[in-house]
Amino acid sequence: MNGADNTIVILGGGLAGSTLAKQLIMMYPNLDIKILEFNSYPVPLAKFKVGESTVDMAGHYLRNVLQLEAHLEQEQLPKYGLRFFLPDGDNTDITTRVEVGNGQRPVSKSYQLDRGKFENFMHATLLEQGVDFIDSAKVVNIAINESSHRVTYVKDSGSEHTIEARWVLDASGGARLLQKTLNLEAVHTKSHHSAWFRVAGKVEINDLSTDPQWLARVPEVARQLCTNHLIGKGYWVWIIPLSGDNTSIGVVVDPEYHDVEQLKTLESTHAWLSQHEPQLAALLQAKQFEVMDYKAMGNFTYRCESLFSPNRWALTGICGSFTDPFYSPGTDFIAIANTLICKLVGEDLAGNDLKAPCMASEQMYFAGYDSLISTVENQYGIFAHNLATSCKLLWDGTLAWSGAGLMFCNDRFTDAKIAMEVSDELMLMGKLHTTMQQVFRRWSTSIPDRELRKDIIVDQLDNFGQRAQRALVQDYSDEALVAQVKQNFNTLCTLAVAMFKLVEDKPVTDSEVALLVSGYRHEPEVETELNNLLFNH
């Protein structure tokens, strides 16, 4: 047997590459896994990379699939979900802005990652588990062949080495090694522009007001340890806590509404913040935090034309695709890609042909990608309209937990039998979701905004979204999981109908979703819960 037959080379040892190696070695302990990483280890803490904020699927993947709970709970920051402050006037008073978020930590745990700390931990862990983790290695040539592949790299000492392997898996991030080697076409969509920086110190959202009633609305930790979004027409600003009392601050804009030239430098970004988020800008000015780093990036939404090849190569992480950071989905897509890759490696080890499994894997991955793109593309303009935005936030969260997210968190994402049984519901969920995004856009330009309750604290009363999120941590039999996905689709149909009634006072038969919800069973409690969340004081 050729020594290359069980050798896998992973290009890149960051978040995507290290977690892929961990998953592979757990599933197939006889593999010879080699990681080629350009950086030298240990890497600095608070490493300058995108991807500190994780959400439900990523939390399940890191905690349960990779069994990293001890590290996550002891060394990383717990996350209290996503929190949104909608715009009000000139945004000079945080207490008058509608707040959408949790009061407690969700049961489907997620984390704020210090990438440097996490990657150093993974480096040490993989070495202990027998992975050949080669750092300070620059890949200079990749030869993809029918029988086996060859990867040549140079160490920082100048010595050149070549590895022969059956699989080459690219997790090289922005280097995009396989994409460039194979001339894979990158498909770009309308992209937003981002600038972000890290400061040494805690930037507390609660420091924006001394109003005792507002401060007491939710526990202090709930605002401290979430991903805070300050949003306005065509933009949003993130505030993310990091371990070590550091904070990540970023601005993401739609160029249709904001001049990206204003985000080219740290100084111009501060000036932009002074105009659009004056309270945050004043806090940063008053505290005089040390700025640790700064970066601006545009045109970042793209995907490669192919991610999984029957010729035994694959891409994961941002070297293969990147959507948009609004809902912190980056590590979710890493989890999905890694899980699909591990399934393909298993098919290969079993001697099965890879053409059909690779095609199915790409269909599954791109279905999720396209759904997320529809969630954010041409949607930033909605953010000036509080009613449309609130409906969107409630809808998007419930949708994320209802179909593929539920299957993934129950470790059935690659189960072909279950996927077939719920294929109609998943397809209709996707179509309903895309249609509702169009509806939210229409509402934001044609429906007068309405006064909402200021405290849309989503876990203070039982509701459709909370039930969907809690279901992520329940153990289901195959039959029960299928039934839950079908029930979730019915709930989404009811939610769409309820939104049309509350926003437009329009019967569903006269709406854009009439055909998609045809035959649904109405759940009257969903309409009541939506009304309570949005309007009741």
Image: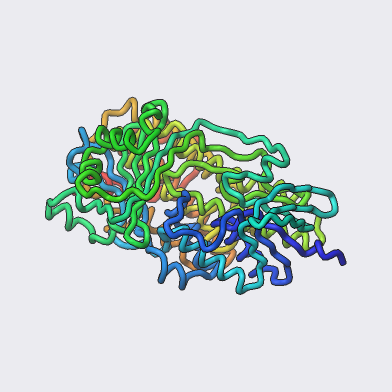
The quadrant where residue 412 appears: bottom right
Residue 116, percent across and down?
47, 59
Residue 30, percent across and down?
73, 71
Q: Is residue 156 left or right of residue 252?
A: right
- 55 in relation to 382, above or below: below
Residue 381, percent across and down?
37, 31
Of the pair 292 and 343, the residue shown nearer to us: 292
Of the pair 121 and 421, the residue shown nearer to us: 121
- 236 in relation to 328, above or below: above
- 60 in relation to 193, above or below: below
- Badge count: 0
Furthest residue to the right? Answer: 1
Instruction: Name the quadrant of the N terminus.
Output: bottom right
Of the pair 192 and 359, the residue shown nearer to us: 192
Q: Is residue 338 left or right of residue 406?
A: right
Q: Residue at x 63, y 36 (%)?
A: 186
Q: How is the image coloured?
A: rainbow
| Residue 165 in view, yes or no | no
Residue 103, percent across and down?
28, 59
Q: Is residue 104 left or right of residue 359?
A: left
| Residue 100 in view, yes or no | yes
Q: Residue at x 20, y 52 (%)?
A: 207
Q: Residue at x 41, y 26 (%)?
A: 256
The quadrant where residue 132 appears: bottom right
